[in-house]
Image: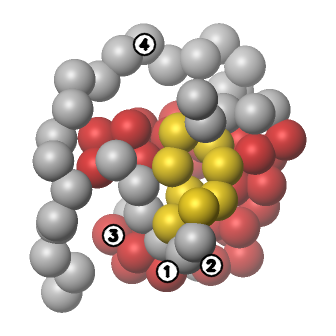
Amino acid sequence: MIEQTHAPNEISQLPTEIESPQGKLVYLYIEATGGASADELGQILTMKKISILSVLSSLSSADLVEKRNDEYVLAN
């Protein structure tokens, strides 16, 4: 099991450009934990890695998340 090491933050409203339920779930998880790897997201959210990577690509294209080292974090 993956141990949470990120400090929880206040969760804000979701950006309106996120339409898919999977996109909302991934965004909220990244926001709540401060960042996560694709593998962590797949394991915690019980989603296939190909789905996670597709969602992350969409969120990255919308400038909502960015990859830093091995983790995806909210874009500034």
Tell me which label, 3 or 4, sits earlier in the chain: 4
Front position in the image: 42 or 59: 59
Label 3 SS: helix
Q: Position of residue 71 (x, y in %)?
A: 51, 66
Q: Position of residue 46 (x, y in %)?
A: 42, 72
Label 4 SS: loop
Query: What residue is drawn where x is 79% and y is 55%?
Result: 57
Could you give the CA–CA distance between mark 2 and mark 3, rounded to whole angstroms?
Answer: 11 Å
Residue 59, by quadrant, is: top right
Q: Which residue is mark 3?
A: 44
Tell me which label, 2 or 3, sits earlier in the chain: 3
Could you give the CA–CA distance between mark 4 and mark 1, rounded to whole angstroms?
Answer: 25 Å
Query: What residue is drawn where x is 55% and y is 75%?
Result: 70
Does the image show residue 11?
yes
Image position of 30 (left or right of 57): left
Tell me which label, 2 or 4, sits earlier in the chain: 4
Q: Which residue is mark 4?
A: 13
Q: Nearer the viewer, mark 1 or mark 3?
A: 1
